[in-house]
Amino acid sequence: MTPLDHAELVRRSIAGFAEMLTIVGRFGEGTDAVIRRPDAIGARIASMGANPWFDAVVVPAGSDPPVDDPLLPYCVWTLAPAIIGRVEVPDIATPCMGLDLERSLPFEFDPVVMVTPTPTEVGLLNDRAYGADPSLELLAADIEDDRIATYGIESEGRLVTVAMTLALGDDLAVHYVATEADHRGQGLATRLLATVIEESRNAGMRSVTLQASPDGLSVYRRMGFQTVGLLRGFIRPTVI
């Protein structure tokens, strides 16, 4: 089988981000929140305030970004270097990463015993781990989509590491990976994702993609993920 090149992996990564935004918007806010345009896919979730991770759209790979439009949400994510009518927030730029499942993981690991947390539990742990006000907890609570799966690790009966995935064709998009503060540094998220990746490979998936946070970037690189693009976040200028 021909290896997936960077262009295809970045396309898959961006598609996974965009589709997860539509799911969170649809179930967290309502069907009217969803935005699907040739140049912008995501959701308008004004209830989250100035939040680039939820009140946002993503420009599909290969599309030109839209000129600013008042109907678009707070943040527009794109590979492009500029958007007319918008200003970049450099601090939130996020690498797109991809793993071709034709390649084996570059390390040995012991698979973990996984549990299946509710979307609410995934949201709660993410909110705690990243110091956010309740946000993902509320948005994720009512998610019901056959393409979504949740995974977790428990320690002494307590959920300590979580992840959510979205299956798009033969790509598995990874989202909302988080570990409780008092369980970090133990490699739990790595082992959880490695177990998920091997299950996905055995199920016939072709790739795993994600967008890396600063804390997760080095972890994903050690797992064999390649950086295939950089998504830049653009917001509407503040009128004073």
Image: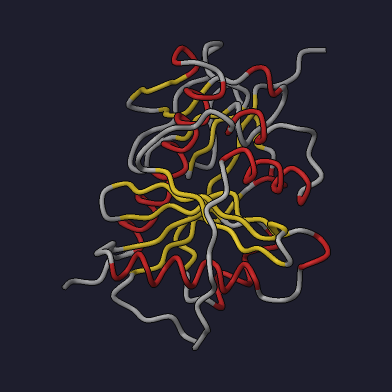
| 61 or 164: nearer the viewer | 164
| 148 or 51: nearer the viewer | 148
Q: Position of residue 26 (x, y in %)?
A: 47, 23
Q: Is residue 52 above or below residue 68?
A: below
Q: Residue at x 72, y 47 (%)?
A: 91
- Going by the image, does 154 lie left or right of 66? right
- Quarter of the image for the C terminus: give it: top right
Q: Residue furthest left?
A: 1
Q: Position of residue 49 (x, y in %)?
A: 72, 22
| 93 or 113: nearer the viewer | 113
Q: Residue at x 72, y 58 (%)?
A: 158
Q: Residue furthest bottom?
A: 108
Q: Residue at x 49, y 55 (%)?
A: 210
Q: Position of residue 230 (x, y in %)?
A: 53, 53
- Quarter of the image for the N terminus: give it: bottom left
- Going by the image, does 169 lie left or right of 65? left
Number of callouts = 0
Q: Is residue 64 above or below residue 113?
A: above
Please indicate, yes or no, whether residue 230 appears anywhere in the rendered image. Answer: no
Give the colouring mode of the picture.
secondary structure
| 180 or 61: nearer the viewer | 180
Q: Position of residue 130 (x, y in %)?
A: 76, 48
Please indicate, yes or no, whether residue 24 appears anywhere in the rendered image. Answer: yes
Q: Residue furthest front?
A: 157
**Hey, which quadrant is residue 45 in on the image?**
top right
Q: Residue at x 52, y 30 (%)?
A: 24
Q: Is residue 165 above or below residue 134?
A: below
